[in-house]
Image: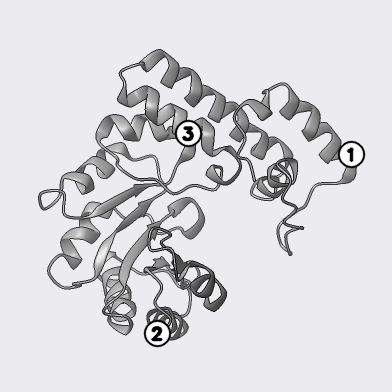
Amino acid sequence: MQTWADITAMDKDFKVITLVGGTNIKECCILAQKAEEIGLFGISFTSPFYFKPANVDQLAKCCTEIAAAAPNTAFYYYHIPVLTGGNFQMIDLLKAIDGKISNFAGIKYTHEDFMDYLSCLNFADRKYDMLWGRDENMLSALVLGAKGAVGSTYNYAAPLYLDLIKAYESGDFETANALQQKSIDMITLLGKYGGISVGKSYMKLIGLDCGTFRLPVRNMSTQDYENFKADVATLHFPDFQSTI
């Protein structure tokens, strides 16, 4: 956190949001306090995934305690139930915290419940920043009114998504559709070659070697990587990859 604070201190448009964790609320509070001390823009928190909150009210209590540890720092809840098992409606969380957590800025919404997402987007006259978190569904989120997004594939394919947004905003829905399909084709290779670790292989292809994952994540074998590169070539990846 300190390193990111140091290298972005002179660029106010570069907003750093640090994930303070999920299973140990005391440690989350310590990290939140540190983030505020060094001037980061925001903190983020995921639902505890071992001893899970029994209901939304318990989750709201967790958010309240952590947000209070850094009261002058934007607080975002990171909704990703496929990994945390925190299968709560986010509209219920907003109702539970509204008016009680002054620095609650919004939600990173990594789920496919568009009904819930739209309800959150419209809640309290669009008070909260609802950041979309499913890269492969960005176009659908734009239709609903999403204004921001956070996603891992933007690291290595930012031009693809910038072009998608531009096409959508200009009314060129056929192009936007085609670009979203390209995104889906690219993301499909993550599933084919082992999941989250494939992102680092994409990063290696753009010239930024981020090394390998630690256990329990599975890394590609040398042969898998060669097969992966062959599949990526069929996507014409250089046409839309990020550049350093």
| Residue visible at 70% across and 35% down in the picture | 192
Amino acid type at mark 2? Glu
Q: Quadrant of residue 37?
A: bottom left
Q: Choose between 102 and 190: the one closer to the eye.
A: 102
User: In the image, is residue 108 above or below residue 222?
Assistant: below
* Residue 64 at x, y percent in the picture: 26, 76
Q: Report which residue position mark 2 lands on.
A: 37
Q: Choose between 21 and 3: the one closer to the eye.
A: 3
Q: Is residue 204 left or right of residue 115?
A: right
Query: Residue 223 bears which disc, if any?
Result: 1
Q: Earlier in the sequence, mark 3 or mark 2?
A: 2
Q: Is residue 146 left or right of residue 179?
A: left
Amino acid type at mark 3? Tyr
Q: Are circles 3 and 1 on residues that touch, CB within 8 Å?
A: no
Furthest-top residue in this view = 174
Label 3: which secondary element? helix
Q: Choose between 236 and 194: the one closer to the eye.
A: 236
User: In the image, is residue 75 above or below residue 109?
Assistant: below
Q: Report which residue position mark 3 lands on.
A: 161
State the separation of the CA atoms marked 2 and 1. 46 Å
